[in-house]
Amino acid sequence: MTDRPVIVLDDDPTGTQTIRDVPVLTRTDPDHLRWAFEQGGEGFFILTNTRSLGPAEAAERVARIAADVRRAAAEFGVDPVFMARGDSTLRGHFPLETDVLSEGEAIDAVLLVPAYIDAGRITIDGVHHVVGADGQRTPVGETEFARDATFGFTESALPRWVEEQTGGRVAASDVALIRIDDIRTGGPDRVRAILGEAHDGRVIAVDAERDDDLRVVAAAVRRAEAEGQRFVYRSGPSFVRARLGQHASHPISDLELAPAEGAAPGGLVVVGSHVAMTTRQLERLLASRDPRVVELDATRPTDPDHLRALADEIVAALEDGTVVFRTSRTLRRGEDADASLAIARDVSAAVVAVVREVLERRRPAFLVAKGGITSSDVATEALGISRAVVAGTMLPGIVSVWRPVDGLAPGLPYVVFAGNVGGDDGLLTVVDRLTRATASLAPRPTAERGDARPTTQES
């Protein structure tokens, strides 16, 4: 383990989609943290699921996890660096999480690095863009993501977005920029010089259009930290990969997707996200493959008879092939952000209850969770995962595969698929790959409960 391990506090599980061979925790009991530190490498993930929480609860959770990590790190004699991994389209609890992580620490700067290169989220001259399939760049403040019921915003220029999110506490003029020209012309020395001017928790927004930009920034950051500077990061998925010293890797092989012995013939696809991309992907899958569809009525999330009937239907249908379990596609909104979040939590709890009952009765060949909050709740509450290892990606840099180490289904190929990435054919491609692997590969023995050491990380 490095002296400055990066502890990625992920507000939903989709931040793992750019990396491989890295441990993931969903709990921070001392034994779990010791296991993660003992795996070695540059760091590990802790799933916080704070994007599904209100501000007060999110702050309490981040503070508790950070305290747990610091206590465990002291046992190993290391000094952790914290990264609050957030949505690449700028939704989430900022500046709350970085404020909490900075409390009681002499932080020189908060690095704001939202780029997600693989999914077309880039930052140029301080303006964050979403790049469509046609190559068209749209400022993020003009996209559907900016109209999020809970985390909506208006600004696309990161300095003004910071001012908006902080309610004016941090003025746009006080936000420093590391621009593309600084990175490509000046290299690590120029970036290191900009970092060296930071103090008192100044926000520094970082441009990035390609992975090489982030590798330059990561090299300068590591040098600055080795020389005594202290940072907290707010990052999209791409800087996670660069800071952990990894490069983009090939998608996972079919061999690594083999189902466990005794699994059902069919896999389970759970769709909770309502963003337009997920809806298009789901429509494409249904039109092309016509899988069995089981739908949760989002107006009845607390009806036990409804939930029991859904579980019965899914268990029976898994014997015939892949099943899509989705929430009804009409998105329910509350009167305000808190009410909308409460509705989302009720629906997510219903999804978890159904999936958990299915898993207790029948193990699917694979499980795909579509949507950030959905994938988090399925991992922690339905599968009961405390420890997992990120095996790799299904699509280049955008869909990760976990192998649970514990819980209801150790070794199950668990696919974490963000709602807002993948292209219209993304879900179809993932399900086709998993289905082919299930049909063509001999089942492998069920993984034993216990430790699973990741393989050596790429450099």
Image (cartoon, rainbow, N blue to C red):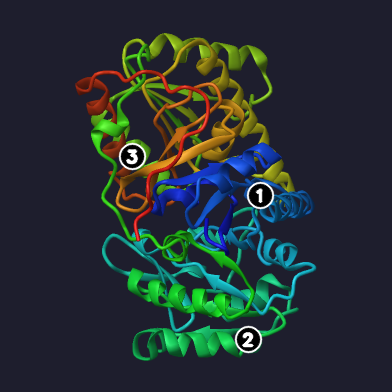
User: Which circle's residue, 2 or 1, is located before the other in the chain?
Assistant: 1
Q: Residue at x 47, y 22 (%)?
A: 448
- Which residue is disc 2 drawn over? 198
Disc 1 element = helix
Q: Amino acid at mark 1?
A: Thr
Q: Nearer the viewer, residue 17 or 271?
A: 17
Nearer mark to the viewer, of 3 and 1:
1
Label whose residue precedes the other's in the sequence (3 or 2)? 2
Q: Which residue is mark 1?
A: 50
The one nearer the camera, 5 or 361, is 5
Image position, residue 357 (x, y; %): 57, 16
Q: Position of residue 185 (x, y in %)?
A: 35, 90
Q: Which mark is residue 213?
A: none
Local SS, label 2: loop
Q: Tell whether 88 sits left or right of 111.
A: left
Residue 372 seen by the camera: no
Q: Residue at x 67, y 18 (%)?
A: 303
- Of tags 3 and 2, which is closer to the observer? 2
For residue 427, which numbered disc appears in the image?
3
Q: Residue at x 62, y 53 (%)?
A: 149
